[in-house]
Amino acid sequence: MLSRRNFVSGAGAISAAVAAASVSKAAMAALPEPVLQTSPNTMPPLVPSTGRPYNAVVTLNGWTLPWRMNSGVKEFHLVAEPVVREMAPGMKAHLWGYNGQSPGPTIEVVEGDRVRIFVTNRLPERTSVHWHGQRLPNGMDGVAGLNQPAIEPGKTFVYEFIARRPGTFMYHPHSDEMTQMAMGMMGFWVTHPKTKHPLIDDVQRDFCFLLNAYDIDPGSYTPKIMTMLDHNLWSWNSRVFPGIDPLVVRKNDKVRIRIGNLTMTNHPIHIHGHEFEVTGTDGGPTSRSSRWPEVTTDVAVGQMRQIEFLADEEGDWAFHCHKSHHTMNAMGHNVPTMIGVDHTGVAKKINKLIPDYMVMGERGMSDMSEMEMPLPDNTVPMMSGQGPYGSVEMGGMFSILKVRKHQPAGNYKDPGWYQAPKGTVAYEFTGALPEAPRASSAGGALTHPARAPGAPTDVEVQIRKPVGGHGGH
């Protein structure tokens, strides 16, 4: 739900927020009314009706913050406050964020714009806002105690500067940063070029999202802020699969995806079916000579990576972090490996004491996607998501790039599952199988290296040190 009183009425009229003519003179001199958004769905791009035109971004499971023009200055109002975020159907988290959401809304401006951001603090502790990657006056950089006094609860501060260079940036607190970022306080900032830029190509689809992570015990709502790496919910814009919307594009669209990482570890972001180039970082667009085709790019802590590709292959293509633990939900870290262990006898005995006990993990973890055991309240399954052929067995940082030939230009509606042409889907083979070669026979002597005389036969690894010195090296 998007709400406001005298700024804009209803999500359908969101584009009217950019028209200064709709704001009275009295309101122009006062604090802008904050615009709030509580829906977890991906909102349509906010196309500007005044000022320099640009190709607006689409924030995955998010939205763009409206502004008003005041004597040539773009004015925004951010409200730092506790929020409730639906991370996936069936699970909500009690986080901190901005304007009803975590992450906060994306801020879009044009190179050369003078920007004024009012920040109101409705948190129980003081805060500040750092404009990550921006060139600006030192006193506007947002480090509490160093560049400015902290914003105390109930107070409103003003940041004002010129958006000096085009690119993709982030914003987040620089006051009790560990707590506030662990609670979800962050957002995206996009500065569009004011004229045709030699290093920034035109695209038909422009997406952005932030990588963030939480440690929320099953059945609870609030993150454990002291966790450094052992998070159990790895998310894009505070959503986990199957709650992350697909990226819907038209075949042969040029696509840009901007990815910012404010977690505590790196993420190798991988796309199926296409090759991309890294065309920008939070330092700006990359030189054309530095680009090369890739299918995975690592996004380190505090970094932004902008990738671009031609969506010329129809289908439903997986798009995810390639750390496999980051594509699972509600995952425990101290669970022993039970693959190959026969639980049968033990399970029968335990069932007499605990009727609902179920064996897990003796054949791997895919059984988790088929179990119908009850979950604690406010929890999502570890592996989930139904595809056209069964369980996708994913979670966390996973989404789907949906490329369709007949997707209307500028339309982001989910087209449903891809209908693969006949003969292009892997299928079960039912004929006679030839003998498959095994590594032991195929490798021959290489598979069984000779042992030193008198060496024990029950040691897996043998180490042979060089003899005769190093004179021949």
Image: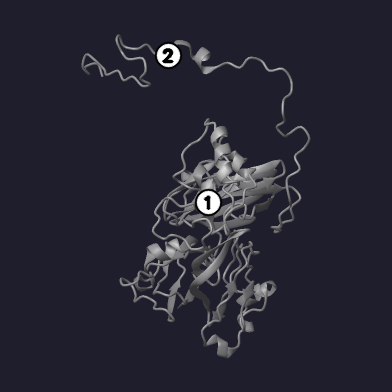
Q: Residue furthest right?
A: 422
Whichever of callouts 2 and 1 sits on the residue coming sooner in the sequence is: 1
Q: Image height check: is 450 above or below 128? A: above
Task: Give the residue drawn at x 54%, y 47%.
Answer: 328
* Mark 2 element type: loop
Give whichever of 308, 222 is nearer the camera.
Answer: 222
* Position of residue 278 measured from the top left corner of the image (x, y, whole percent): 51, 48
Give whichever of 184, 34 is nearer the camera.
Answer: 184
In this figure, which residue is indicated by the disc labeled 2?
448
Task: Give the residue drawn at x 54%, y 46%.
Answer: 327
When asked about the image quadrant of residue 429, the answer is top right
Q: Residue furthest bottom?
A: 26
* Mark 1 element type: loop
When asked about the image quadrant of residue 67, the answer is bottom right
Q: Residue furthest top?
A: 453
Mark 2–mark 1 contact, CB under 8 Å? no
* Position of residue 462 measured from the top left corner of the image (x, y, whole percent): 33, 19
The Cα–Cα distance between marks 2 and 1, rounded to whole angstroms, is: 42 Å
Task: Give the residue drawn at x 46%, y 45%.
Answer: 290
Residue 312 seen by the camera? no
Q: Locate residue 74 relative to residue 433 in the image: left or right.
A: left
Q: Image height check: is 90 above or below 67? A: above
Structural crowding at the residue carrying mark 2, measured as other residues with C-alpha within 10 Å and reported as few (<14), some (14–19) or many (≥20)? few
Q: Looking at numbered disc 2 in the image, what kind of residue is underneath it?
A: His
Structural crowding at the residue carrying mark 1, measured as other residues with C-alpha within 10 Å and reported as few (<14), some (14–19) or many (≥20)? many
Q: Locate residue 225 relative to residue 95 in the image: left or right.
A: left
Nearer the viewer's eye, disc 2 or disc 1? 1
Residue 335 seen by the camera? yes
Q: Looking at numbered disc 1 in the image, what kind of residue is underneath it?
A: Ala
Q: Which mark is residue 330?
A: 1
Q: Quadrant where the C terminus lies?
A: top left
Q: Locate residue 405 relative to residue 48 in the image: left or right.
A: right
